[in-house]
Image: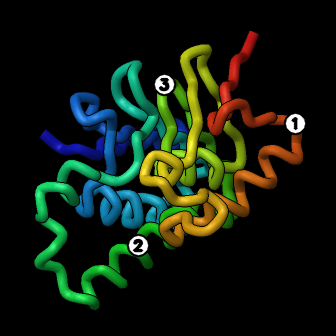
Amino acid sequence: MSHLLKSTEDGVMKIVLNRPDAMNALSRDMMQGLTDALTEAASSREIGCVVVRGAGDKAFCAGGDVKSMAAGRDQDKTYEDKVHDIRIRMQVSELLHEMGKPTIAMVNGVAAGAGLSLALAADMRFAGKSARMTTASRSWGMPSRSFDGGSGTCERCFIAISTGVSPVNGTLPVSIS
């Protein structure tokens, strides 16, 4: 089963983060797939809009695949591989944010860490009543302003807050009536 589903219909590319059992946590393959899909959307004349959502109702995206990191699967990576991973994270956020076409994040459930970066990078965010947004670095004991994994979360979070979203206890609860 693919962890990233992509379809195009009536000029809209729909991307689904498809790991609901892992709260749609982003694996390296998913990040590469997102980069490829967004690059395709940016260059295609047939695609006029991109919509990103998470499978299931628990999470839009819980961020990076921390279980994989904790299991030591990332310890054997070379310095070059680690730099490549950071650049892919940055590229995904940049493509969503700077693409010359509307990008939309449909947020239901948790959007944390890199998932928050994806949501904030989109031009528009539509959030369900269960949406909860947070920087994951708080749970690691890191101040969220000092490190965002290279994905632009801090800057985009300040923009979202300045447009009327207020933080409460480190999360950004969002509700649409």
| Residue 86 visible in the current orientation | yes
Residue 7 at x, y percent in the picture? 37, 41
Q: Nearer the viewer, residue 167 or 44?
A: 167
Dot placed on the residue nearer the N-terminal end, 3 or 2: 2
Left-right relation of 33 to 145: left
Q: Position of residue 174 (x, y in %)?
A: 69, 25
Kind of residue sitting beneath label 3:
Gly
Write down the residue under mark 2: 88
Question: Nearer the N terminus, badge 1 or badge 3?
Answer: 3
Q: Which mark is drawn over residue 164? A: 1
Amino acid type indicated by mark 2? Ile
> Which kind of residue does numbered mark 1 sit on?
Gly
In this rendering, would 129 be left or right of 140?
right
Q: Quadrant of the N terminus?
A: top left
Q: Nearer the viewer, mark 1 or mark 2?
A: 1
| Residue denoted by label 3 | 109
Residue at point 81%, 44% (across, down): 161
